[in-house]
């Protein structure tokens, strides 16, 4: 009998400029919230995997997991817990989810029902914006993309998309309007307010054609999900969701090495793998949390995940979102087959916030809450199947997971 | 049928001050050597886990795995490989081994025979010794052990051991003599030469009572091991060894929070777990690679792994090693039951070198070569069972693995 993996608890701090909170406090808050949600205790956990891009450069501390053990588990000598940090730039959270998923399956191979926490965090605002931007550049190729920032790298992608298609800058700007609308319904969001299309359009270019309001900000925050076997989830009586699969794939770290910079091969392959293993496809997905660090990234994600043909998403974006300001949240995309797809109901990286190591986990929190029907004013009625999509750098890593109601 | 995990290939660069080599070159060399050893190709690998403490602070690059994919796998678009970095300070390598071990078992749960690479590296000598020492301090509690270096922290352990037992400083110095003797037979060692007991005794105190020659140095290097199921190893006709188990446990990151600083509870618990699951005990172990970042660490490891009673190892060290200089390598410890135990035949962290992220993997390389009878002048005749022991910080993390001949 092949065991499946379940999410039995979720936790998620506020995202934002949290100068008065330490990174450990944020990790603790998210972790304890997940434990309380699952109705289990600290020492029921066997392992934790903590996604974090660079506490070393942001805060001068490595050996993060041991520090968490000390502060959160009170160094209880009875504890037999193993934590470690997982790093793959902005996909660190997704990679922690993938490792946790596989660790539960490894336990299942020996008929153990391990309870594993997948967490993620980043504490970025202790640095100035220019320092933080420089640290984030360490997710690109520091030997071969010297001097690029991420707004510039994604600006190149946007430039190319504008060149190869008939999309206009205005199409991209609708995405930010939609994300902020969703975030306005999310109490944990960094920017929980609406913005007008004009405001996005007229925001200043941080690395033209990337404008400020096409970009996610610098944020602090943490998120956590608790995984175990479906068997254990049932035994605990948890209100669980099933993770059908989590898959990740690498691509070149540098953009110049790719055949077509407008295709994130890592996303495509990771998505193919979760679709293949689950027997589900893009046509089954109701909700998606995709990696929209910049507006262009959401466009490419919608294509690479299979929702729209390559280089055609812009048409549907314009059609779906042009009256976005006037519609009630959540605002769906219309798919070519006439179905509706709700993307980044959380507000996404753009407006919920992007404390980079937390993002992949925060996406799983939003999907879980949606599938449980607990997303409040952001709730997508009848959502059955959800996908998360977390990217490292400009696509050097992508992690995709598929979740569904049991 | 419960699958077991096998090591089917190993690779290990020279350790030392490798100023003319980049970190990627080192990772590539170790990885390709492991592939060649196993007789498989790059794209046969499904995942890799790369132990590294702090390329961020040592070299300004994060998203390490994607960079490795780019340079080593030539960004082959047919590749479907997922790499990620694993961080737990000096136990990063051991944690990568643990994750790889579990990933193979997760595959086995679905009747897949995954081939997974566990690698580790550090490139430390691009920084000055004082800068590197400061970066390494990030493995301690940067909030509560401010201003301590690791020679100082381990110096406190040594001080306490000298206080609580009748051990003398000379007892510790024998360990360095033994390690250098072993390293003199290891072509990959950073310090492949013998030192006299007098030389160790008279070496200058870097953080009294820690002397220079009680300490491991600053080093560059990489190591890799290839894991898969025993079923696949047999199918490939590989000269494999079996990993019975890999277990890791956390303790408080800071020394002051421990009840007895002379007991590394993390080591004890991790060892108990591998002994319990394998049905083997310290009495079955022929060879051990233990985490001797400082001489005191080897003493504590011998006790915490169950080879000697607590606070008694010094007696046997003196007895076993006092004529070390005159004996042929490898020089064993005599155990209380009269058996011989060979420890750190590689030269250990002290003399083979300690590029911190590589260490946990390098230990598994040495044990594998010993169990295969390929350790050259360091060979322990008839070695059947080996243990590795990798510590993060001052014991905030410990990872122990048990390997045996098939």
Image (cartoon, coloured by chain):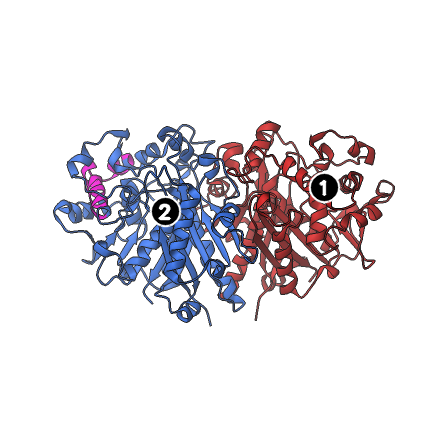
Chain colours: A blue, B red
x and y percent of residue A114 in the render?
49, 63
Q: Is residue A343 left or right of residue A7?
A: left
Q: Is residue B37 left or right of residue A343?
A: right
Q: Is residue B314 left or right of residue B277?
A: right
Along the viewing direction, whichever of A41 and B11 lies nearer the viewer: A41
- The main secondary structure of the magenta stretch is helix
What segment carries the magenta color? A159-182
**Residue visible at 55% across and 56% down in the picture:** B115
The C terminus of chain B lies in which quarter of the figure?
bottom right
Res A66 visible = yes
Vertical position of residue B392 compared to residue A382: above or below: above
Chain letter of the residue beneath label 1 in the structure image? B
> Quadrant of residue A281 in the image?
bottom left
Along the viewing direction, whichever of B236 and A56 lies nearer the viewer: A56
Q: Name the front one of labels 1 and 2.
A: 1
Chain letter of the residue beneath label 2 in the structure image? A
x and y percent of residue A388 in the render?
34, 53
**Residue visible at 75% across and 47% down in the picture:** B345
Near mark 2 (Cα within 10 A), the count class, few <14, some 14-19 or many ≥20, is many
Dot 2: what SS? helix
**Magenta span contains residue A161:** yes
Vertical position of residue B39 compared to residue B179: above or below: below
Q: Is residue B21 left or right of residue A85?
A: right
**Magenta span contains residue A1:** no
Q: Which residue is mark 1?
A: B295
Q: Which residue is mark 2?
A: A359
Q: How far separated are the C-alphas under marks 1 and 2?
A: 42 Å
**Residue visible at 87% across and 41% down in the picture:** B326
Along the viewing direction, whichever of A206 and A28 lies nearer the viewer: A28
x and y percent of residue A140 in the render?
42, 36
């Amino acid at each position: 009998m092949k065991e499946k993996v379940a999410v039995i608890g979720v936790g998620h701090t506020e995202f934002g400029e949290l100068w008065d909170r330490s990174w450990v406090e944020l990790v603790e808050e998210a972790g304890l919230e997940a434990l309380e949600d699952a109705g289990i205790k600290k020492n029921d956990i066997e392992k934790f995997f903590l996604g974090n891009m660079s506490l070393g450069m942001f805060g001068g501390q490595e050996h993060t997991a041991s520090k968490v053990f000390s502060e959160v588990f009170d160094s209880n000598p009875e504890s037999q817990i193993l934590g470690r940090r997982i790093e793959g730039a902005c996909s660190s959270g997704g990679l922690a989810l993938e490792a946790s998923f596989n660790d539960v399956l490894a336990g299942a191979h020996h008929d153990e029902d391990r309870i594993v926490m997948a967490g993620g965090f980043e504490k970025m605002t202790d640095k100035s914006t220019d320092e933080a931007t420089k640290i984030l550049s360490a997710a690109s190729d520091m030997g071969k993309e010297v001097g690029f920032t991420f707004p510039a790298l994604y600006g190149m992608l946007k430039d190319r998309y504008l060149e190869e298609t008939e999309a206009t800058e205005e199409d991209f700007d609708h995405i930010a309007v939609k994300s902020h609308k969703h975030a306005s319904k999310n109490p944990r969001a960094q920017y929980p307010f609406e913005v007008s299309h004009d405001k996005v359009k007229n925001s200043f270019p941080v690395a033209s054609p990337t404008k400020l309001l096409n970009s996610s900000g610098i944020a602090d925050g943490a998120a956590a999900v608790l995984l175990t076997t479906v068997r254990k989830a049932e035994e605990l009586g948890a209100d669980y969701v099933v993770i059908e699969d989590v898959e990740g794939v690498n691509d070149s770290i540098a953009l110049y090495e790719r055949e077509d910079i407008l295709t994130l091969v890592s996303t495509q392959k990771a998505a193919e793998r979760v679709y293949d293993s689950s027997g589900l496809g893009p046509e089954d997905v109701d909700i998606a949390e995709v990696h929209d660090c910049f507006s262009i990234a959401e466009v490419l994600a919608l294509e690479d995940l299979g929702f729209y043909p390559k280089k055609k998403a812009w048409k549907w974006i314009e059609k779906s979102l042009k009256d976005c300001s006037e519609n009630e949240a959540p605002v769906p995309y219309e798919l070519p087959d006439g179905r509706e797809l709700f993307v980044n109901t959380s507000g996404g990286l753009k407006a919920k916030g992007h404390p980079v190591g937390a993002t992949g986990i925060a996406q799983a929190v939003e999907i879980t809450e949606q599938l449980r029907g607990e997303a409040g004013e952001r709730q997508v009625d009848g959502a059955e199947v959800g996908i998360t999509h977390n990217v490292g750098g400009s696509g050097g890593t992508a992690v995709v997971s598929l979740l569904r109601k049991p």
